Image (tube, rainbow, N blue to C red):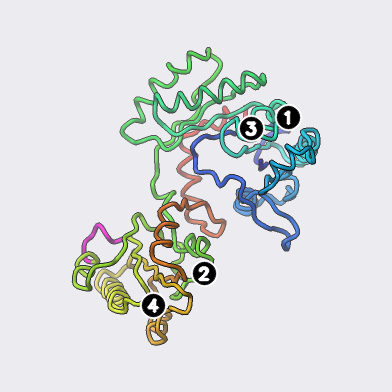
Amino acid sequence: MSVLVRAQLKSAVYVAATRQHVVGQESVAVENGSLLVDKDVAVAKEIFKLDSCHYADMSPVVIMPGYTKRFLDGDITVDSQLNKIRTSFDRITAANEFTIVEGTGHTGVGSIVDCNNARIAAELGVDMVLVANGGLGSSFDDLALNYSLCKAHNVKIRGVILNKVREDRMEMVREYFPKAMKHWGSDVPLIGVVPNLSVLSNASMLDFEGLFKTEILSSRSRRFQQYNRTTLVTAGLRRFLAKLSAPEYDNTLFVTHVSRNDIILGFLSHAQNFELTEKRPYGGGLILTGSPSCDQPQKYIKNIIKNAEVPVLYVPMTTFKAMEKITHFTAKFNPTDEQKVRACGEHYASHINFDAILA
């Protein structure tokens, strides 16, 4: 569970989201490694410049591996968890005008340690905002379970936000979802219908640096460049160059084995020629794979890559493992990617009724 902040007089709301690609119980070290906090807390604190909040209060309970067993063995109690959460919540609300309590996942997350999101909202005395992926039937079914758990804990639902709605379904969702929510009575409003913006989920080379714990071999000036598809290169150079010239591959991340000098040089040559003729940056990127780690780019190839502007990354693992990690990877916000953060804020600001949230 994490706590972050914004603007009104000692008010608060709890947000629980389902199927939103949350980081989950993934923690990061902060304050020179002395404290572990939820990864989303570290991102939010830096993005929103939450200087009035301390890390320890923003992430009072961190469920690490082994935590659940310790709880079931009686080493951790419900009261000890709730006391930490209440104390942190009180400190944050005292220092800020409006507090958002962000639960990991849906309202039932945390039930194994008897502190699910709905119960915590009830303990703190705050209303709930429910978030689900856009649609009609499946979205309502997901929310129905969340609604029931909120009712079981006497938590008021301040509103529902539907996220990542297909553009061609926006009007239908706006018209019919409120009708579906009448099953719950007239007290739950639809306060947001947000169209899907695929660019927000596209990964950049900076994201892949973090995923593979390695650094770009070329210039870092384009580390925020995003890719809308990933393609494994196994064909010969001629077929690869033909693919590079196709417009639909302009923003593609290519993956190939580090031994393919022909592919590496062909990629770098194409990128350079593209930029000379088009007078704009080439949108592609290249990840080189190879295991064991001594199987690295040859020295002269490395020197050529070092002087290139186009992003190139080396990953010391097999191509299969690298592709598997990329395929299952969901890019999260990075505080240093200001352009993406700003684009997200502008996108959501125009589709959510923030007055209803702050009421």
Label located before the other in sequence (1 or 3) = 3
Quadrant assignment, res 164: top left
Residue drawn at x 61%, y 23% is: 150
Is 39 positioned to the left or the right of 194 in the image? right
Label located before the other in sequence (2 or 3) = 3
The answer to whether the residues at label 1 and label 4 have Cβ atoms under 8 Å apart is no
Q: Report the amino acid beneath label 1.
A: Leu
Q: Nearer the viewer, mark 2 or mark 3?
A: 2
Q: Report the amino acid beneath label 2.
A: Thr
Asked if residue 75 can be seen in this view, the reply is yes
Tell me where residue 210 appears, x and y as whole percent. Answer: 53, 62
- Give the CA separation, mark 1 to mark 4: 54 Å
* The disc label shown at residue 214, or none: 2
- Helix, strand or loop at label 3? It is strand
The answer to whether the residues at label 3 and label 4 have Cβ atoms under 8 Å apart is no
Over which residues does the magenta segment extend? 245-251
When the figure is inspected, residue 130 is found, relative to residue 6, above or below; the finding is: above
Quadrant assignment, res 167: top left
- Give the CA separation, mark 4 to mark 2: 18 Å
- Helix, strand or loop at label 2? It is loop
Residue drawn at x 44%, y 72% is: 291
Tell me where residue 166 appears, x and y as whole percent. Answer: 35, 36
- Give the CA separation, mark 2 to mark 3: 37 Å
Q: Which residue is mark 3?
A: 14
How many other residues sit within 10 Å of disc 1, few (<14), some (14-19) or many (≥20)? Answer: some
Label located before the other in sequence (4 or 2) = 2
